[in-house]
Each structure stands twice: as C-alpha cells, then as structure tokens.
Amino acid sequence: MPEYPDDADGDALQRIADDGVDMTKPLAIEFQILVPNENTADKVARELQKSGYGSNKDYDDVDDEWLIICPIEMVPSYENVVSMQKTLEGKLASCKAQLVGWGALV
C-alpha cells in the first residue's frame, strides 16, 4: 500500500485506501468548485465542458451559493489529484471561482 504525504489530500487518499479501494484502478473523483452566482456557475460549467470535463451545477439555498461538481475518472494517486487540482485552479483563475475540495464515492 502506498504511503501518502501528511496533508489533507494524503489523509483523504489514505481513508479511501483504508476503505479497501484498489488505488491502482481509475475512480471517479469529484472536484468541488464554489462560485459566487449563477452566471459564474454557467461560465465555469462551459469552460470545464470545453476542456472535456463534466460539470454539474448545484444551488445551496441555505448558504446562498453555487457549487459546481466536476467528476473526473482517474487513478487516485496523490500526484494525479494534486496535478488535477492545479489544472482546475488554472482554468478557474479568471472566473472568480474557487476549488474547495474533492471526494470520491466509494
């Protein structure tokens, strides 16, 4: 079993591995992107789709904010997760959107 760095990403990957997931096979990782309004949500969704990524918009009426879920099938390695976060952050820089986390349904 791989050893993961002692940070939030490493801890999350360790929890997934501890659940018995085969960490050498692709897994759907859902990256969560917080956006300030529906127009920005639409812009981010279009940008992600142009880049070949899926995106689902969701409005949280309790917190009055929009969230984009971007599912990406990938081998859940530390390097892949960190690299994808950097890629997504680069695409979001001009959109006033913020990558706030990721998770996997296992």
Image: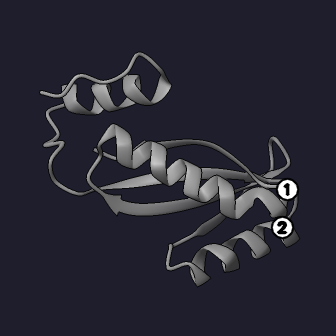
Residue at (54% x, 49% y) in the render: 85
Give the amino acid type for the residue marked by disc 1 in the picture.
Lys
Whether residue 14 sits left or right of residue 34 in the image: it is: left
Whole-percent x, y for residue 40 in the image? 83, 67
Q: Earlier in the sequence, mark 1 or mark 2?
A: 2
Q: Nearer the viewer, mark 1 or mark 2?
A: 1
Residue at (37% x, 49% y) in the render: 80
Position of 100 relative to 55 (above/below): above
Other-residue count near label 2 (Cα within 10 Å), few / some / many at <14 / 14–19 / ≥20 = some
Give the amino acid type for the residue marked by disc 2 in the picture.
Thr
Please tell me the numbered disc located at residue 40. 2
1 and 2 marks in contact (CB < 8 Å): yes
SS at badge 1:
loop
Please tell me the numbered disc located at residue 96. 1
Residue at (87% x, 61% y) in the render: 37
SS at badge 2:
helix
Whole-percent x, y for residue 48 in the image? 61, 73
